[in-house]
Amino acid sequence: MKVLFAASESTPFIKTGGLADVIGALPKELLNSGVDVRVILPKYRGIAQQYRDAMEHIGEVYIQLGWRRQYCGIERIIHEGIPIYFIDNEYYFGRDNVYGYMDDGERFSFFNKAILQVIRELDFQADVVHCHDWHTAMIPLLLEADYRHDPFYAKMRTVFTIHNLLYQGVFPYDMLNDLMGLGNRYYLGVEYYGNASFMKAGISYSNHVTTVSPTYAREIQTSHYGYGLEGLLTSLGDKLSGIINGIDAESYNPANDPYIHSTYQTNLDEKRENKIALQKELNLPVAPKIPLIAMVTRLVDSKGLDLLVRTLDELLHYDEVQVVILGTGDAIYEQWFREAAKRYPNKLSSQITFNEGLSRKCYAASDIFLMPSKFEPCGISQLLALRYGSIPVVRETGGLNDTVHAYNEFTGEGNGFTFSDFNAHDMLHTIRRAVSFYHQPKHWRKVTNNAFSGDYSWGVSAREYIDIYEQVIEQ
């Protein structure tokens, strides 16, 4: 089976969010299962020099983008046994940031067209092109519109994965005519309130659609989470699947993580050494018996930060806890947490930055991990927290609902603490419930054992993707 992953980012080359973690980890698991898997990405300026120096130039083509004839270099790295191809065009990708430009529609139209042309240049006749999020969502449509008559592409199938439906890649409809020459033949499959939605095209024209958790697959079929596409998504029926993400369990392993102060497996005394080290590093009082609550997150509205803003003073004033916030995002949240740390210097550390090493220290040091998201298609942070024995407190939405199960003190089942309504004091009550069990060693040992014993790797999910690939190939 030959599968090409088409995506806009991947660890370790370039990362802005969880998409990169998926593209960096899932192909490795597929390779272990015998799939001939390859990955294709843009060659961004932000890719570290060590990887740029290792790239081998293997060819070049020219892409016709409306009246524009654009250069497309093809670079290659073999990374952990997987061929990674990079689309080289300085005009589109030689920029300081990955996204956020006025011509993003043109940039990723070029990327979509380039991928289909480059496949032939590589002579990689993929059985399945697996497209991820809006940045590669035009590939299924372009395949139908321009390539089906060609024997090389005739049997090629597409799977499209929605990582976050909120970001759809919506651009003026005339742009499709200008850049791709599609005219009005495919109007109904891409039109979105008078504009064109790349995301809608991926959903409409791929052979199968997946999203990153079973609960999110159900949620996006409702008006609250569907962003105008709920009708289309509901019409897919069995063509829509929810498959939970995994993590790279080899890289994220407290038994050998080079970033953390003290490695451990399931021993809470050894884990506690990380708490003491982090308290010292962040100038918090060294108090190993006080529960340490961590958030490692983008500081944006969707992460449920309004709930924390509403209740943090109450929590820190009345409760004997320490809190660490790590992340960057909207200026209003950054400033609020900075000021809160000044009010509670002995209880709150606000680290308005992002640092991979510090994030791992937070997972290893914390007792409780807070994730009260408004919505969360899958979420990686709660899986990392569970891997490191930091017990999640989450809202029951998306992948959080599928991976974190409320602790039941009577049966001993459950690996975290949950609440359902987007309500600040429901969250506060759930935090306090977690803290109360933290002070009951018998229960805390049970819930942490449940967390440590979970399988958060890609193994099961990779098998589900292979099943879907086999289904679409047989169509």
Image (tube, rainbow, N blue to C red):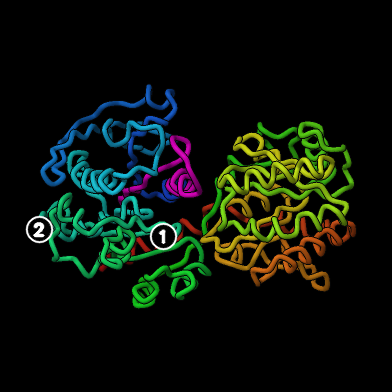
Q: Residues within 10 Å of mark 1 (few under 14, many from 20)?
A: many
- The part of the image, by quadrant, that contains residue 417 is bottom right
Span shown in magenta: 1-27
User: In the rendering, which numbered label is found on residue 162?
Assistant: 1
Q: Position of residue 125 (x, y in %)?
A: 22, 48
Front residue of this view, candidates 312 and 291:
312
In this view, the residue in front, 187 or 157, is 187
Q: Earlier in the sequence, mark 1 or mark 2?
A: 2
Considering only vertical position in the picture, is 198 above or below 80? below
Residue 398 is left or right of residue 269, and the answer is: left
Give residue 456's position: percent from left, percent from top: 60, 54
Image vertical order of residue 250 relative to residue 381, above or below: above
Q: Position of residue 387 (x, y in %)?
A: 67, 50
Where residue 207 sits in the image (x, y, percent)?
A: 29, 65
The residue sitting at 60% across, 60% down in the picture is 373
| Amino acid on which disc 2 is placed | His
Q: Residues within 10 Å of mark 2 (few under 14, many from 20)?
A: few
Label 2: which secondary element: loop
For badge 1, the amino acid type reads Ile
Of circles 1 and 2, which is in front? 1
Query: Does 111 sit left or right of 277 as displayed?
Result: left
Residue highlighted by disc 2: 149
Q: Quadrant of residue 111?
A: top left
Q: CA distance from mark 1 to mark 2?
A: 28 Å
SS assignment at label 1: strand
241 displayed left or right of 103: right
